[in-house]
């Protein structure tokens, strides 16, 4: 059953809840911005990405001899 | 002397607003932390991406706020006794002590980890140490144990510019140490001037302030000695990579004024101070705030002026700056 009646508690704590929501939104925006900044600032990123890549394997002799 | 914790309620009596939680983080202290950390960050050689710099400032400030919440949790008993602190959220019954502790611990962990991810491990380690120093070394131990509490505890407030510097450079240098020492040496005369005209409060709370344990004459002498010790530290920064003619000129004037104020405090006795309601002590306390603000502003001005070739050429030819 949906809650349709506004409880007095909701009124009383609305400022607190809105404040917390704004803080969380701000935090998400900051982490998103940080992610963009870190990715832009880094050099070319490489990873195995589900499949073996000889160029990233320091023990791959054949690749090193090339 | 230390056991005055009595009837701290475990649950809050009233309803806490969002502002009460902000108050737990000591926003006025946070604003000073933001300012000095920003100064450390801007004067450091090198650069950060603007978003990384913003994140660094936010998380340094958040760490400072978290240690403030831990301090309020621990000091709720003495905050209740002192007029200046009686309206803080815990003694006012708005926030339960355990809630403040949980908030402080959670924000501490978050601030340190996020600063690490935003900048580097050394900056995060320094922030963690600062929080530990303020919450444990100062609040839990020194504050109630020794009249030198302000001197050693002042180190916690002195770390932010060093953390800002390390966030950019990844290492500690003489410039970072001088910015640390500037706040470290400034803190005792600043707080003892306050303690002189807030005497009844500290006495009531039985906090071993120098005014209570060694008397007001000794406090006046300590203010003068620490102010004199502050002068070489403030001037030394002028001769490093972060200083320059503008900073040197301002530092000379401000230090002369601070010493003059400390001298005036030292020369007065209690009868004179009572007669004019501690006018000199209040004036020096207010001046000390401007002193720190202006010196760090001058350091940032030097960093900005470094982009102006005519100024750097002028500074390079000043014989006084080539002494070191």
Image: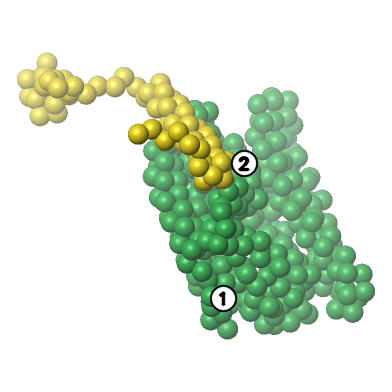
Chain colours: A yellow, B green
Q: Residues within 10 Å of mark 2 (few under 14, many from 20)?
A: many
Q: Which quadrant holds residue B35? A: top right
- Which mark is in front, 2 or 1? 1
Residue B39: mark in rendering: 2
Q: Position of residue A63 (x, y in %)?
A: 11, 19
Image-quadrant location for residue A48: top left
- Helix, strand or loop at label 2? It is helix
| Residue at x 54%, y 78% (from the top left corner) | B6
Please state the horizontal and vertical placement of residue B189, each as a whole percent of the image: 72, 65
Q: Chain of mark 2?
A: B
Residue under the image location 39 percent in, 27 percent down: A35
Disc 2 and disc 1 on one polypeptide chain: yes
Residue B70 visible in the displayed image: no
Q: Residue A47 vs residue B148: left or right?
A: left
| Viewer-proximal residue among B14 and B8 | B14
Q: Is residue B99 left or right of residue B26?
A: left
Classed neighbour count for the residue bearing mark 1: other residues with Cα under 10 Å, few (<14), some (14–19), many (≥20) = many
């Amino acid at each position: 059953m949906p809650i349709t009646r506004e409880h007095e508690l909701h009124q009383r704590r609305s400022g607190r809840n809105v404040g917390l929501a704004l803080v969380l939104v701000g935090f998400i925006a900051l982490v998103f911005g940080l992610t963009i900044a870190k990715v832009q600032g880094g050099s070319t990123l490489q990873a195995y990405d589900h499949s073996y890549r000889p160029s990233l394997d320091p023990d791959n002799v054949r690749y090193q001899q090339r | 002397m230390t056991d005055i914790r009595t009837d701290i309620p475990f649950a809050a009596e009233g309803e806490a607003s969002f502002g009460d939680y902000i108050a737990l983080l000591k926003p006025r202290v946070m604003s000073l932390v933001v300012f000095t950390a920003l100064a450390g960050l801007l004067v450091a050689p090198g650069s950060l991406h603007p978003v990384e710099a913003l994140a660094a400032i936010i998380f340094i400030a958040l760490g400072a706020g978290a240690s403030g919440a831990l301090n309020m949790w621990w000091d709720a008993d003495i905050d209740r006794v002192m007029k200046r602190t009686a309206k803080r959220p815990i003694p006012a019954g708005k926030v339960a002590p355990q809630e403040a502790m949980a908030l402080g611990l959670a924000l501490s962990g978050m601030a340190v980890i996020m600063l690490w991810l935003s900048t580097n491990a050394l900056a995060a380690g320094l922030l963690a140490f600062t929080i530990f120093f303020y919450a444990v070394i100062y609040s839990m131990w020194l504050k109630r144990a020794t009249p030198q509490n302000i001197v050693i505890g002042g180190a916690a407030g002195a770390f932010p510019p060093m953390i800002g510097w390390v966030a950019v450079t990844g290492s500690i240098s003489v410039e970072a140490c001088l910015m640390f020492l500037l706040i470290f040496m400034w803190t005792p005369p600043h707080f003892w001037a306050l303690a002189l005209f807030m005497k009844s409060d500290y006495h009531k709370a039985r906090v071993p302030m120098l005014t209570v344990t060694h008397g007001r004459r000794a406090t006046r002498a300590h203010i003068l000695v620490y102010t004199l010790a502050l002068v070489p530290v403030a001037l030394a920064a002028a001769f490093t990579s972060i200083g320059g003619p503008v900073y040197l000129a301002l530092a000379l004037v401000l230090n002369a004024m601070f010493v003059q104020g400390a001298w005036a405090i030292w020369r007065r006795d209690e009868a004179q101070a009572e007669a004019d309601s501690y006018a000199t002590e209040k004036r020096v306390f207010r001046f000390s705030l401007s002193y720190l603000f202006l010196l760090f502003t001058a350091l940032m001005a030097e960093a900005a002026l470094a982009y102006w070739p005519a100024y750097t050429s002028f500074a390079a030819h000043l014989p006084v700056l080539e002494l070191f």
